[in-house]
Amino acid sequence: MLSVVEGIFLFIAIIEFILGVLGNGFIALVYCNDCVKSKLSMLGLILTGFSISRICLIWIIIIDGFICIFSPGTHYSDKLIEYSGYIWVLVNQSSICFATSLNIFYFLKIANFSHYIFLWLKMRIRRILPFLMGSLLISWLVTIPQVMKYFNFNKMKNRNTTWQFNMHKNEFFVQQFLLNIGVIFFLTLSLITCFLLILSLWRHSGKMQLNATGFRDPSTEAHVKAMKMLISFIILFILHFIGCAIEISYFTMPGKKIMFIFGMTTSAIYPWAHSFILILGNSKLKQASLQVMQQLKCWEKRGISEPLGEA
């Protein structure tokens, strides 16, 4: 039986799950509709993959959480933990890869540098997504064997205590690095992109002040909007990482369900909150959301007026 505090956090997690599915589903629907009508743009392809991967991420978080809370015996099954571990690696790294692709896309489209490397990348912006998809595949090929090794290591723990100690001492840090190498790589790219975009904005605003043309020109607005998206991704992803760490720490203290539910609630903030930030920051998505809201208002007015007309 859950306590009142645990029930409140679980209720918040369910609301986050619903918002995440709706927000990311809306993004996927808008761009899938574009794909049917015409050729899907690179940005549309990135956002479609991004939203679908995060819908899968949200489902994994909530299903794994409910199994752990209400059926812990099932959750501790070796096979279930192993399969969920593989799925988590694939979906989580896919989500981060698409987020990094989006960050780099906005950076190359909006930032302004005269360096030849930047200009070379800007001319080859359409190759960024294939490159990152290739990096994602390499990350999977490196991470999956490490996950298999990790599960085999846990199976050996009860058989040989000396081997367990040596493994922990000599290979633990290397193993943890390899398990997270994809996440570290994509997050590092996002941090570099964010730093360079801030630098571009700072230089651009300095030029605007010297020319006395005002600070809030369209180019500056685009800089600020892209920078907000990048910073929000980094902050929300750090929260997501902290939430996942709290969930993992629960298994060392399985009696404290509040810790696991709080971790699940924290980790679920990233997939739903960032989707709404993207909707508000993208003119196409924002316009589509306003149209949906207007349509809902029309249906609501019709629903109210029809009973009154019958009366």
Image: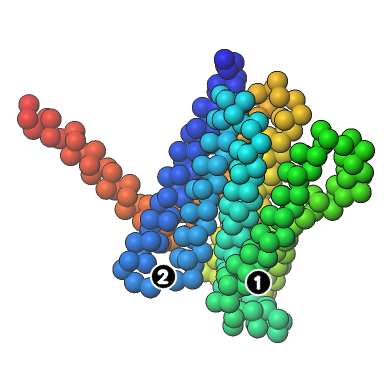
Percent x, y for residue 38? Answer: 34, 72
Residue 255 badge: none
Which labelled disc corresponds to residue 204?
Answer: 1
**Residue 123 occupies quadrant:** bottom right
Q: Is residue 246 visible?
A: yes
Instruction: Name the spot of residue 7 as percent of width and height, x first.
Output: 55, 21
Disc 2: which residue: 40
Residue at the spot 13% in from the left edge and 30% down from the top edge: 307
Q: Nearer the viewer, residue 108 or 164?
A: 164
Residue drawn 67% across the image and 74% down it? 207
Dot 2 or dot 1: first in sequence order is 2
Location of the N terminus by quadrant is top right
Q: Is residue 3 left or right of residue 210?
A: left
Above or below residue 72? Residue 269 is below
Mark 2 vs mark 1: in front: 2
In the image, is residue 273 above or below residue 70?
below
Q: 43 or 229, which is in the foreground? A: 43
Above or below residue 305? Residue 254 is above
Residue 158: which quarter of the image? top right
Residue at x-position 88% and y-position 45% = 167
Amino acid type, label 1? His
